[in-house]
Amino acid sequence: RKEVEQDPGPFNVPEGATVAFNCTYSNSASQSFFWYRQDCRKEPKLLMSVYSSGNEDGRFTAQLNRASQYISLLIRDSKLSDSATYLCVVKFDDYKLSFGAGTTVTVRA
Amino acid sequence: EPEVTQTPSHQVTQMGQEVILRCVPISNHLYFYWYRQILGQKVEFLVSFYNNEISEKSEIFDDQFSVERPDGSNFTLKIRSTKLEDSAMYFCASSVGDEGYTFGSGTRLTVV
C-alpha cells in the first residue's frame, strides 16, 4: 500500500476558479504534513505546512483530518501562476519525507 | 534567502562509470538528505545524514551509493557504477530539525 496517495488530476480550471484536492496517508503515526509545489523539472518548494486546526495562507487553505487520514488543499481565485504539480508530503517519526506522486493543476486564461 | 546549491546541474555519464553529485547545504542546517525523482515519477527518499553519519537510508540506497561530508560545507552523493536506471533528478535537501526543509535545484543525471 502506498504511503501517500493523491489524485493525479489533471485539474483544468479557469482563472478565478476554486480548485480543491485531497491526499490520503497510510501511517496513522504520521507527525507532520506539508504541501509542496513543483514546477516542471524543478525542485519541490514548500507551499505550506498543514496543522491540525487547518490553516490558511492567502488564497491557499489546508485541512488535516487525522481520523480519516487525509489532507486537503484548496486554492481560491486561482491564477495562471498557480499552474503546477502539488505534492502532498508526510513525515513519520523520523526526518524522512514521504511524497505523494502529485496533483497537476492547470489554470487557463 | 539562504539556499541549497547543487552542482553540476546536468551530468551525462556512461553506464558503469562513477559519478559524484555535489551539494552545499544551508550553513546552519544540521540534517542533510538526498532524494531522487525519476522522470514522471514521485520524489523518493534515498538517505539522511546527521552528525557525520547516515541516520536512515532507503532500499534504493544500496552498496553502489555512498554519501560523504568531506569538509564543513559540502555534502556529496557517489554512485560507484552507474546503471541506466539511475537516470533521474537528484535533489539534495537540508533542514535545521524536522522543519524548514530546503531543496536544491537538483542534478539531472543521465546514464547512457
Image (cartoon, coloured by chain):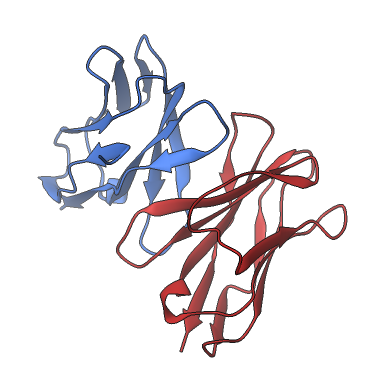
Chain rendered blue: A
Quadrant housing residue B68: bottom right
On screen, residue B90 above or below B55: below
Q: Which residue lies furthest to the right in this view?
A: B71
Looking at the picture, tell me which residue is in the foreground, A81 or B23: B23
Q: In this view, does A8 lie above or below A89?
A: below
Residue at screen point 47% across, 73% down: B86
Tell me the residue at 48%/53% (across/down): B59
Name the side, left or right, on which A12 lies relative to B98.
left
* Residue B83 position within the rendered picture, expressed as x and y whole percent measured from the top left: 48, 80
Q: Colour of chain B?
A: red
Residue A99 spot, x, y in % from top left:
38, 43
Give the residue displayed 47% in from the left and 28% down from the top. Answer: A92
Against B33, residue A74 (above or below) is above
Residue lying at 34% horizontally and 43% vertically, measured from the top left: A87
| Residue A53 seen anywhere in this rendered image of the structure | yes
Confirm whether residue B1 shows in the render. no
Question: Which image quarter: residue A35?
Answer: top left
- Viewer-proximal residue among B47 and B92: B47
Quadrant showing the N terminus of chain A: top left
Where is residue A78 drawn, in percent x and y?
23, 39
Q: Locate residue B65, reporting x and y percent.
A: 62, 65
- Give the side of residue A10 with respect to residue A79, left or right: left
